[in-house]
Image (tube, helix red, strand yellow):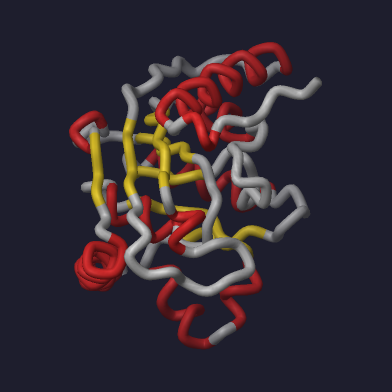
Amino acid sequence: MYAYGLSVYRVCKVLATFLLKVLFGFRVEGAEKIPKEGPVILASNHMSFLDPVVMGVACPRVVSYMSRDDLFRYPILRWLLPRLYVIPVARGAGDLAAIKAAIRTLQNGMVFGIFPEGRRSRTGYIEPFKTGTAAIALRTGAPIVPAAIIGSDKAWPVGKGPRLRRPIRVVFGDPIAVSPGKTDHQSLEALTQQLEAAVTALLPPEYHRKPTI
């Protein structure tokens, strides 16, 4: 199944790469910062329906993601998504099984992609990160590679159709080393704040959250 799934993944990646470059002038910076082997967590901002595809194309390795489980109800997606290493998760249900599946993915030495905001931003700015990414990292010891997706919100805005020729760019930052440790509130918050700062630093100022008054 893994070898068969890998061939499907590669075909889809070649097609997606071609389309992103032709339609959106897709570019990647810093992909060499992603460890070439071993477990890795890719953590990025999230502003568009396109983002999982964009990150999968940008990363030179296979990336596994979580996605809402209702997508698996459609026959074609039910066949395709597992072959793209997508993990179903029940939205808003605190799906422990999905978290365990993500941890197993990392324990198997794969790359796991996640959007720490928990949903697509509707404001045009990066939103506060949730602690789930930090919890997975602290339980596995997997390094976190911060990433910024720039322009996908303009290329395919939330609630609207695609707008061609709007450039999309992905920038990867330096990995954040993580040692397995306690997942107490203080540890989770500290790592989450470090990660949010790292992703924010990769984004242009126009994406930075406006300070509250």
Count of numbered badges drawn on the protein:
0
Can residue 182 be seen here? yes
Q: Residue at x 49, y 64 (%)?
A: 156
Q: Residue at x 55, y 62 (%)?
A: 157
Quadrant location of residue 146? top left
Residue 11 at x, y percent in the picture: 21, 72
Image quadrant holding the C terminus, namely top right
Up the image or down, 97 lies above or below 106; here it is below
Can residue 4 be seen here? no
Q: Residue at x 38, y 30 (%)?
A: 145
Q: Residue at x 22, y 68 (%)?
A: 22
Q: Residue furthest bottom?
A: 75
Quadrant location of residue 118? top right
Image quadrant holding the N terminus, namely bottom left
Q: Depth check: 79 or 47 in front?
A: 47
Residue 95 at x, y percent in the picture: 70, 51
Up the image or down, 42 lies above or below 184; here it is below
Residue 119 at x, y percent in the picture: 64, 50
Q: Depth check: 62 or 5 in front?
A: 62
